[in-house]
């Protein structure tokens, strides 16, 4: 009874959020206190996608295909955001391990400025060339006609997307995952309320259709960023941006770009591989693309929480390396990996048994359901390996070694997965099924390679 009570007290402490010294706290307790808000944060992030696809699914296959194609390209923006976010987690966690809080605040300011400039550049290009981007992705004429206004709003609003990722990475590095979690709760809550109102309208107010979904998402994320900025500047935490930090330091920005380059690279490579796979899927029609889009959103709903659990390893590695406790950092990774593998093993069973029922939530089109349920059954057969690999990658990133995962991505996702998927789907005629098989096999291989390289231990000597 006392054990159960203690566990629930620990869960409440994790959600409530308290600043801790994760270089001295027990490893198991540290993982729980960091992972619970990180998992809830990622659940909120994945719920963004699920809510959008739920309402957009009622607008038909063209709307679903538009979201799928735009999301694939948007992964490039996510990649940049996640790359700089990795730099934020690595640099801030290392400074916290060293107990150098003023330098952590300085790094945070430079990170925000760098991310904002990159977001504005990418957003402008996406807004201007939205139609051309959709056409390049293989969209049919009807999809382009419906999707351009949606894509323009999403691309233009990417400043909020990137800052949301970036600042949450900073919070995680500082051991403040509850602030990252709350930012996603707020932005997702606004999105859930606005989605049906802006898409379908209310009373005598006509809805905006697919464009309404774009506005709901952009407004929700923007409000979340406002919340983040308030906590970065309010001075109530060890992590705070003070007057002394409000000076651009090109030396720090260069260091940020060096650390984040590998992070951007690994996610850009990963995103590009998904874009290529989506482009191949588009060859088999809008129903196949819609089914793949639904399956991808459902898969992300479970992978993002697993990524949240993995993120605990990144913070623990960074802070403990800063405190000169490399052995403790390594033990934290192995224990986190064990928990993640168990979680995704359970999810695998659920998807294999109930994949079709999950797909039916989003559409009544039988052909789309068949594509989505098949994707869920096949891709998730590699989930156990995914769980291991995600923790290894986050451990590298937390140490500031973002180049190793980028190298693995190039070899496995570009040189192996894309040609293998094309071979199975087009050359051998397995169509969409071949792509699903390639994803399951190659991401499992990715995990095993990451595990082997982590055991070599070179990440312990990286300086950030």
Image (cartoon, rainbow, N blue to C red):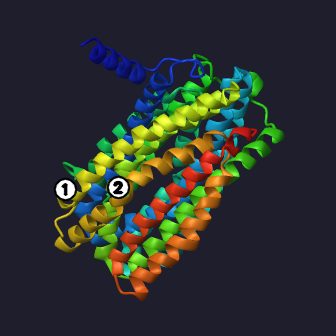
Q: Which residue is mark 2?
A: 299
The one of 438 and 41 positioned closer to us in this rendering: 438
Q: Is residue 365 left or right of residue 431?
A: left
Q: Is residue 9 left or right of residue 353?
A: right
The one of 136 and 169 positioned closer to us in this rendering: 169
Quarter of the image with the C terminus is top right
Dot 1, how many residues are within 10 Å of its Cα: few (below 14), some (14-19), or many (20+)? some
The spot of residue 148 in percent (x, y) is 44, 68
Residue at position x 66%, y 42% in the image: 87
Whether tag 1 and tag 2 are in contact, CB under 8 A, the answer is no
Dot 2, how many residues are within 10 Å of its Cα: few (below 14), some (14-19), or many (20+)? some
Which element type, helix, strand or loop, lies under badge 1? helix
The one of 158 and 462 positioned closer to us in this rendering: 462
Quarter of the image with the N terminus is top left
- The residues bearing labels 1 and 2 have C-alpha atoms spaced at a distance of 13 Å
Which mark is first along the chain, 2 or 1? 2
The spot of residue 66 in percent (x, y) is 38, 68
Height in image: 230 above or below 382?
A: above
Q: Is residue 183 left or right of residue 142?
A: right
Q: Which residue is mark 1?
A: 354
Residue at position x 58%, y 61% in the image: 409
Height in image: 249 above or below 14?
A: below
Residue 358 in view here:
no
The spot of residue 331 in percent (x, y) is 55, 32
Tell me, for residue 423, which label it has, or none.
Answer: none
The furthest residue to the right? 251
Q: Is residue 203 left or right of residue 306?
A: left
The spot of residue 417 in percent (x, y) is 50, 71
Height in image: 21 above or below 113?
A: above
């Amino acid at each position: 009874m006392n054990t159960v009570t203690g566990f629930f007290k620990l869960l409440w402490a994790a959600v409530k959020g308290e600043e801790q010294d994760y270089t001295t706290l027990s490893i198991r307790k540290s993982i729980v206190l960091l992972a619970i808000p990180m998992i809830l944060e990622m659940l909120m992030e994945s719920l963004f996608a699920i809510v959008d696809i739920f309402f957009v699914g009622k607008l038909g296959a063209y709307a679903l295909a538009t979201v799928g194609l735009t999301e694939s390209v948007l992964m490039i923006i996510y990649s940049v955001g996640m790359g700089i976010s990795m730099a934020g987690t690595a640099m801030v966690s290392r400074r916290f391990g060293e107990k150098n809080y003023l330098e952590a605040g300085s790094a945070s300011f430079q990170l925000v400025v760098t991310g904002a400039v990159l977001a504005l550049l990418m957003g402008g290009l996406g807004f201007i060339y939205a139609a051309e981007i959709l056409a390049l992705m293989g969209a049919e004429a009807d999809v382009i006609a419906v999707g351009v206004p949606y894509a323009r709003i999403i691309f233009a609003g990417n400043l909020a997307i990137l800052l949301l990722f970036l600042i949450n990475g900073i919070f995680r590095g500082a051991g403040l995952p509850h602030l990252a979690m709350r930012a996603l709760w707020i932005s997702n809550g606004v999105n859930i309320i606005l989605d049906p109102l802006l898409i379908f309208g209310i009373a005598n107010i006509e809805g905006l259709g697919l464009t309404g979904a774009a506005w709901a998402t952009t407004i929700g994320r923007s409000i979340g960023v406002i919340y983040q900025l308030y906590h970065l500047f309010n001075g109530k935490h060890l992590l705070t941006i003070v007057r002394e930090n409000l000076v651009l330091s090109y030396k720090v920005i260069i260091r940020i770009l060096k650390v984040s380059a590998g992070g951007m690279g690994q996610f850009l490579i990963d995103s590009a591989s998904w874009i290529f796979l989506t482009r191949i899927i588009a060859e088999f029609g809008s129903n196949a693309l819609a089914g793949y889009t639904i399956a991808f959103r459902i898969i992300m709903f479970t992978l993002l929480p697993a990524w949240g659990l993995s993120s605990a390893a990144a913070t623990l590695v960074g802070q403990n390396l800063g405190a000169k406790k490399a052995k403790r950092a390594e033990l934290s990774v192995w224990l986190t990996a064990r928990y993640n593998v168990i979680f995704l093993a359970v999810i695998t069973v659920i998807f294999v048994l109930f994949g079709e029922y999950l797909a039916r939530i989003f559409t009544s089109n039988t052909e789309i359901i068949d594509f989505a349920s098949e994707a869920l059954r096949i891709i998730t057969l590699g989930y156990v390996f995914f769980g291991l690999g995600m923790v290894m990658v986050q451990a590298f990133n937390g140490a500031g070694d973002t180049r190793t995962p980028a190298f693995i991505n190039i070899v496995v996702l570009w040189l192996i997965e894309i040609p293998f998927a094309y071979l199975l789907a087009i050359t051998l005629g397995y169509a969409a099924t071949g792509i699903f098989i390639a994803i399951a096999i190659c991401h499992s291989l990715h995990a095993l390679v990451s595990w082997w390289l982590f055991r070599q231990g070179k990440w312990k000597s990286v300086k950030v």
